[in-house]
Image: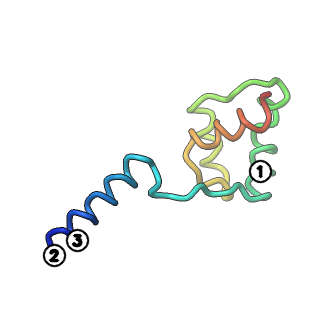
Amino acid sequence: MAFLYSIYIYMCVCVDVRLGCSTKPQRWSDEEKAEVQKLFRRFIVMQQLPGKRVIENTVKTSSVLKRPWRKIKDHIRNEYCR
């Protein structure tokens, strides 16, 4: 019985990892959105996406943004560059 239970647990973990269900999406707070608008205003106005280095260097100066550079770039693309 314990053997079957361990196989069941193993299968559940594998399915969660494969499907990417291990973490829930984190919503952007109003504070984070305002910070992105303030820091990347030049790119938003020109309808361009900032590069990886630009985002990483800008995030170092921010106390609010603690997300990976890729998430910030995706947010700018989805919210402002349409």
Mark 3 or 1, nearer chain start: 3
Q: Percent position (x, y) of residue 27?
A: 68, 57
Quadrant including the C terminus: top right
Q: Is residue 34 left or right of residue 28?
A: right
- Quick one: which residue is furthest to the right in this view? 45
Q: Is residue 20 left or right of residue 24?
A: left
Under mark 3, the amino acid is Tyr
Under mark 1, the amino acid is Lys
Q: Residue at x 56, y 32 (%)?
A: 53
Q: Residue at x 77, y 38 (%)?
A: 79
Circle 1 crowding by C-alpha within 10 Å: few under 14, some 14–19, many from 20? some
Under mark 2, the amino acid is Met
Q: Work out how far the residue at label 2 is from the one at label 3, CA to CA, in angstroms.
A: 6 Å
Label 2: element kind: loop
**Count of number-bearing discs:** 3
Rendered image: mark on residue 11 = none
Which one is closest to the eye, mark 1 or mark 2? 2
Query: Marks 3 and 2: in contact by CB < 8 Å?
Result: yes
Label 2 sits on residue: 1
Q: Is residue 78 left or right of residue 68?
A: right
Label 3 sits on residue: 5
Q: Residue at x 22, y 71 (%)?
A: 5
Label 1 sits on residue: 33
Q: Work out how far the residue at label 3 is from the one at label 1, CA to CA, in angstroms.
A: 45 Å
The color scheme shown is rainbow
Q: Residue at x 58, y 51 (%)?
A: 67
Circle 3 crowding by C-alpha within 10 Å: few under 14, some 14–19, many from 20? few
Label 1: element kind: helix
Q: Which is nearer the eye, 52 or 13? A: 13
Reply above or below: 42 against 57.
above
Q: Percent position (x, y) of residue 52?
A: 57, 32
